[in-house]
Amino acid sequence: MAKARVGLYQTKGETLERTHQSCPKCGPGIFLAEHGNRRSCGKCGYSEAKAAGSSAPKAKPVKPSKPGA
């Protein structure tokens, strides 16, 4: 059964644009999955870290502990 390709392409006018990067090992047509801090290929296992300025997950605020707890 074919896998869904929703979200991997975007239309602009008469052209299609890819929204995800292709895997450098597997070639065009195999896309890297977008995670919070990395991109990875589900076929060959290739993984790369995202740049520090990209959409990295935000740190959650720490709740102060109750005294005597």
Image (cartoon, grey):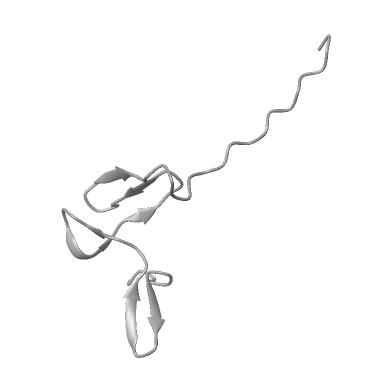
**In x, y percent, where is residue 27?**
16, 61
The residue drawn where x is 34% and y is 63% is 20
Q: How many marks?
A: 0
The residue drawn where x is 25% and y is 46% is 45
Q: Is residue 62 left or right of residue 53?
A: right
User: Of all residues shown, which one is farthest toward the top?
Assistant: 68
Res 65 → quadrant: top right
As displayed, is residue 64 above or below residue 26? above
**In x, y percent, where is residue 14?**
34, 90
Image quarter where the C terminus lies is top right
**In x, y percent, where is residue 48?**
29, 44
As displayed, is residue 59 above or below residue 6? above
Residue 4 or residue 10, whichever sits in front: 10
Image quarter where the N terminus lies is bottom left
Q: Is residue 47 left or right of residue 38?
A: left
Residue 45 or residue 34, whichever sits in front: 34
User: Of all residues shown, which one is farthest toward the front?
Assistant: 53
The residue drawn where x is 43% and y is 70% is 7
Res 5 → quadrant: bottom left
**In x, y percent, where is residue 53?**
43, 46
As displayed, is residue 21 above or below residue 5? above
